[in-house]
Amino acid sequence: MKMNAAVLEKLNEPLAVVADIQIPELARGQVLVRVAYSGVCHSQLMEARGARGEDRFLPHLLGHEGTGVVEAVGEGVTKVKPGDWVVLGWIKGLGLDGGGAQYLHAGRKINAGGVTTFNEHAVVAENRLVHLPEGIPLDVGVLFGCALPTGAGIVTNTIKPVPGSSLAVFGLGGIGLSALMATQLFDCRQVIAIDINPDKLALAKDFGATVTIDARNENVAARLRELTGAGLDYAVEATGLSSTIELAFESVRRGGGLCVFASHPAHGSRISIDPFELICGKRLQGSWGGECKPDEDIPKFAELYRQGRLPLERLITKRYRLADINEALDDLEAQRVGRPLLEISPELNQRYLADRQK
């Protein structure tokens, strides 16, 4: 079998959309998925722009959140079978860790990790797949692969806000908006949304933010002091900037204030904080995928979506063809979009709907 895919050939250059890439035979623990939709997030942007430092796996495929249908399974795979509709994600769940794959094109190898989604077909490790829950549209299901478990997971699994608390979200991309939505599951007194994009700030109000702060025009630290007095109970940082992690940590209160960051600043970045603030009881914590256990948490998030409590479709602001992947990356970098959606094989949607009606 052969396919088309977007390939990272060289850092700081546009991805190459390559045809007739040969798909390898499945190894133990691997699954072949025909990809329907893929998300695009800052992790791929950082890889393509060289912000993660040296890349010794070039050329390679990209993408780590998507949906699709299983076409074949390798030895030992029991979690899914051909015909199953699945969510592809980077957070490891149950099943075999089948490792990455090597594709071939014109005599050269193209590397791939345990999951990729900027491609028409993907050889995926069994433990990077979860069944797409009932009632979840095929396009919306993409967000269950990264944005939702990471952002909402920070709130539901890591922070678990106590009633009457204050919480601020710094950065309103896919992860930040997912975190903001999840605050509505708790009885917070203040929910503050901070960004530089007026459209995202307007959306944040619809998602339950009690206050929005435009970081372009306001002194964020001073405004937060005005709003909270002693400081925030919780801060979620999702911008990918070391300076914002520092600001978010500065903004939480002494005596138990917690700052959690899921962002990934550029390679070589450092954060600088006053260690005395740690002695005074402030806490700083990174998050690996919102402490999400995909096989347990995705069904829970799906139920909240079905109840209308997680309006995920509003995170998807623009759709692109695979051939337009570089436009999607440029728009994401310029903050012109929320969560770009790649329509890899959108024709699968009719088959999906027919299967769900059986």
Image (cartoon, rainbow, N blue to C red):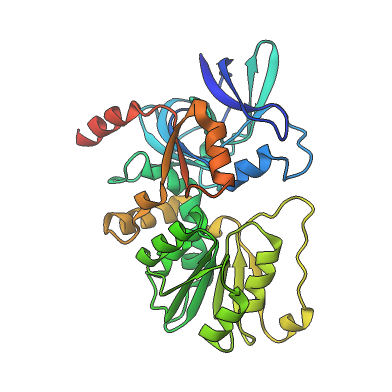
Q: Is 250 or 307 nearer to us in this picture?
A: 250
In the rendering, at what x and y percent does residue 281 appear? Answer: 67, 84
In the rendering, at what x and y percent does residue 216 appear? Answer: 58, 65
Up the image or down, 73 lies above or below 288; here it is above
Up the image or down, 256 lies above or below 200; here it is below
In the rendering, at what x and y percent does residue 241 appear? Answer: 67, 59
Quadrant of residue 57 in the image? top right
Q: Given the current orientation, which residue lies at the most extreme front position?
A: 217
In the rendering, at what x and y percent does residue 295 appear? Answer: 44, 50
Horizontal arrangement in the rendering, residue 176 relative to residue 188 (left or right) = right
Q: Is 291 or 142 nearer to us in this picture?
A: 142
Residue at horizontal 61 percent and vertical 45 percent from the top: 43
Residue at horizontal 78 percent and vertical 79 percent from the top: 275
In the rendered view of the protein, which quadrant contains the C terminus?
top left
Q: Is residue 124 visible?
A: no
Q: Is 96 or 61 nearer to us in this picture?
A: 61
Residue at horizontal 31 percent and vertical 62 percent from the top: 309
Horizontal arrangement in the rendering, residue 237 relative to residue 66 (left or right) = right
Q: Is residue 7 visible?
A: yes
Horizontal arrangement in the rendering, residue 211 relative to residue 27 (left or right) = left
Quadrant of residue 96 in the image? top right
Q: Given the current orientation, which residue lies at the most extreme top position?
A: 106
Instruction: Say how many tags the image has.
Output: 0
